[in-house]
Image (tube, helix red, strand yellow):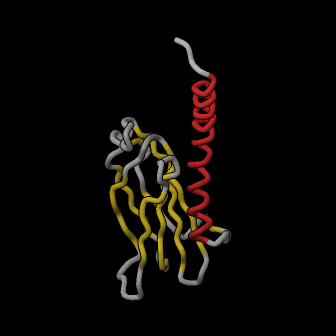
Amino acid sequence: MEFSRRETLAMGLGAAALTVLPYRLMASADDKIAEFTGGADMADSGIELTAPEIAENGNTVPISVSAPGATAIMVLATGNPTPGVATFNFGPGAASQSASTRIRLAGTQDVVAIAKMADGSFAKASAAVKVTIGGCGG
């Protein structure tokens, strides 16, 4: 099989783009965090994230987050093609600042929860989830 110079160049550029793609995905999670926090420091306490250590199916991974005194909680799956999973906003009439849901994970990765507290500070929690069957096309 013979390739023209143009086809060889196109395949080389495609291969180079594929090697850079995973780094761009990770930058996207960092960008989401920076957008939510405005670059502020985050405490390691004040928020609780509950996720399974091992998920047999990445299509339905149960998680729950709780942060007493929070006005918003953002949940990210750092290894997904689109890392933003959910943002929960709590008004003054909220009985508790907690939420639970099921999320889809593409594979083994970290799940991160960031809470914006009423005083403007931020808290962060993360959990590593090992997925045996991928959920995002895996």
Percent x, y of residue 128: 50, 47
Residue 86 position (above or below residue 1): below
- Identified at 37% across, 50% down, the residue is 104
Q: Choose between 135 and 56: the one closer to the eye.
A: 135
Q: Which quarter shows the C terminus?
A: top left
Residue 116: quarter of image: bottom right
Percent x, y of residue 78: 52, 51
Q: Choose between 127 and 76: the one closer to the eye.
A: 76
- Identified at 61% across, 35% down, the residue is 19
- Identified at 62% across, 66% down, the residue is 34
Q: Choose between 74 and 55: the one closer to the eye.
A: 74
Residue sticking out furthest to the bottom: 92
Residue 24 position (above or below residue 74): above
41 relative to 96 in the view: left or right: right
Percent x, y of residue 70: 49, 77
- Total numbered labels: 0
- Identified at 52% across, 70% down, the residue is 115
90 relative to 120 in the view: left or right: left
Percent x, y of residue 69: 49, 80
12 relative to 116 in the view: left or right: right
